[in-house]
Amino acid sequence: MPWPSNVSRRLLVIAGSIAAIAILAVLGTWIYINVISDEAAEPFGLEAGSGEALGDDAVLDGTWTVDTGSEAGYRVDEVLNGMDNTVVGRTSDVTGEITVSDDTATAAEIVVEMASVTTDSDSRDGQFRDSIMNTDEYPTSRFTLLETVPLGELRNSPEPTEHTVRGELTLRDVTREVEVELALQAQGDSVRAAGSIPITFTDFDIEPPDLAFVRVEDEGFVEFSLSLTRE
């Protein structure tokens, strides 16, 4: 028996409302990703020809400290209402020291204040500080170098030198060995270091959000750009 016309009209109205809400959600997400939100920053890197060799007389041995102009953060892909989006969070609240002996970096420790890492979204940053990274309990993240890095080329070459080095990364008090893609470049009296560390969040007991409207990928990158000056 066919439904009464008023019931059919109600069903059509409900179906139309659901379709309209779905369209508005997709349209709103597209506008947010492509119009409202900032374009994701490019990965840190060093430009060929932009350096300045330290010179034969430069003293490399000693302690180099992380100076003003340094940044660190993360890069991760998310699916927002079915649309791909790249999120980049960064902070300049970075400290650390590198020990150099015989023109070789023999030890390094870099510390990042996690509560200061921000993106273009206050709500995302609040979730990052609270449920994801729990910065009240785990305020810092730390990288420690596990192997030596030669620095002698910085004396005579203005070009970036590239290295793959092992280290230990600590997030939320969980430490794992990682591999760092590192670029170094002399710039006058300072040295620039830039690179990234691929990570899987669950390796550090971090559960990326997986909600009805957003799903964050389980893999991402820790990124850094450091300005180093010798004490």
Image (spheres, rainbow, N blue to C red):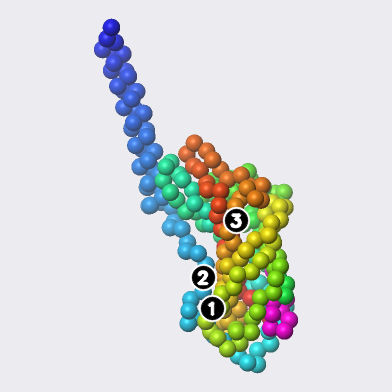
User: Which secondary structure lies at badge 1?
Assistant: loop
Residue behind mark 2: 45
Residue behind mark 1: 160
Q: Looking at the picture, how far across and down is residue 114, in whole percent?
A: 64, 56
User: What kind of residue is marked 2?
Assistant: Gly
User: Could you tell me if the residues under marks 3 and 1 are in contact, i.e. CB atoms within 8 Å?
Assistant: no
Q: Residues within 10 Å of mark 3 (few under 14, many from 20)?
A: some
Q: Residue shown at 37%/47% (left/top)?
A: 31
Residue behind mark 3: 199
The residue closer to the viewer here, 222 or 25, is: 222
User: Could you tell me if the residues under marks 2 and 3 are in contact, i.e. CB atoms within 8 Å?
Assistant: no
Q: Residues within 10 Å of mark 2 (few under 14, many from 20)?
A: some
The residue closer to the viewer here, 185 or 187, is: 185
Gap between marks 3 and 1, in whole Å?
24 Å
The residue closer to the viewer here, 115 or 4, is: 4
State whether the magenta stretch is mostly helix, strand or loop: strand
Q: Looking at the picture, how far across and down is residue 208, in whole percent?
A: 58, 45
User: What kind of residue is marked 1?
Assistant: Pro
Q: What is the magenta range?
A: 96-105
User: Which secondary structure lies at badge 2?
Assistant: loop
Q: Is residue 215 above or below residue 102?
A: above
Q: Residue shown at 58%/81% (left/top)?
A: 186
Q: Residue shown at 63%/48% (left/top)?
A: 202
| Residue 19 located left or right of residue 137 | left
Q: Looking at the picture, how far across and down is residue 154, in whole percent?
A: 60, 84
Quarter occupied by the N terminus: top left
